[in-house]
């Protein structure tokens, strides 16, 4: 299932972009499509082992990885993040692959080479 929620709305001086934030009682994750990470030249290898991934994108854990993305997104894309919250008893994100076990390099190389 695709998770592209890139709706734009006016917000102060910057445009905003809507992202989905998944959470449960033990944590939260910001879903970011692979293309968006590629667009801002985000170094995925710097992410923690508490982030997850699937074929659609990365689920950045809220304490460190999400905050780093927010800073770089504002600097590089010149946009603010607006959250669409999905609160679950036990988040479906926990069933995804741990980011470092997922073959994200192939996906990102596909963008760099113009295949995706």
Image (tube, rainbow, N blue to C red):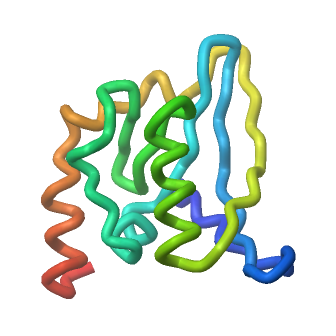
Q: Residue at x 19, y 32 (%)?
A: 101
* Quadrant showing the C terminus: bottom left
Residue occupying image coordinates x 72% and y 23%: 88
Residue 74 locus on image (x, y percent): 58, 68
- Work out which residue is located at the far bottom of the displayed protein and give it: 114
Rendering coords of residue 72 (x, y %): 47, 63
* Side of 116 relative to 74 (left or right): left
Residue 16 vertical placement versus 53 (above, below): below
Q: How many marks?
A: 0
Residue 33 left/right relative to 102: right
Q: Report the front residue among 115 and 113.
A: 113
Residue positioned 47% across, 34% down in the render: 64
Report the front residue among 106 and 75. 75
Seen in the picture, residue 73 relative to 43 is either above or below; the reply is below
Q: Residue 57 sits in which quadrant?
A: bottom left
Q: Residue drawn 22% across and 63% down?
A: 107
Residue 30 position, x and y percent, is 57, 44
Image: 39 above or below 24: below
55 to the left or right of 6: left
Question: Taking 3 as reference, is 86 above or below it?
Answer: above
């Amino acid at each position: 299932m695709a998770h592209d929620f890139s709706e734009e709305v006016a917000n102060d001086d910057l445009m905003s972009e809507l992202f989905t934030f998944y959470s449960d009682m033990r944590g939260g994750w910001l879903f970011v499509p692979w293309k968006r990470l590629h667009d801002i030249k985000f170094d995925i290898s710097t992410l923690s082992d508490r982030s997850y991934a699937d074929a659609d994108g990365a689920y950045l854990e809220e304490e460190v990885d999400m905050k780093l993305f927010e800073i770089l997104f504002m600097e590089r894309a010149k946009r603010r993040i607006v959250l669409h919250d999905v609160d679950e008893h036990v988040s479906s994100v926990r069933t995804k692959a741990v980011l470092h076990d997922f073959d994200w390099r192939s996906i990102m190389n596909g963008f760099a080479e113009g295949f995706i």
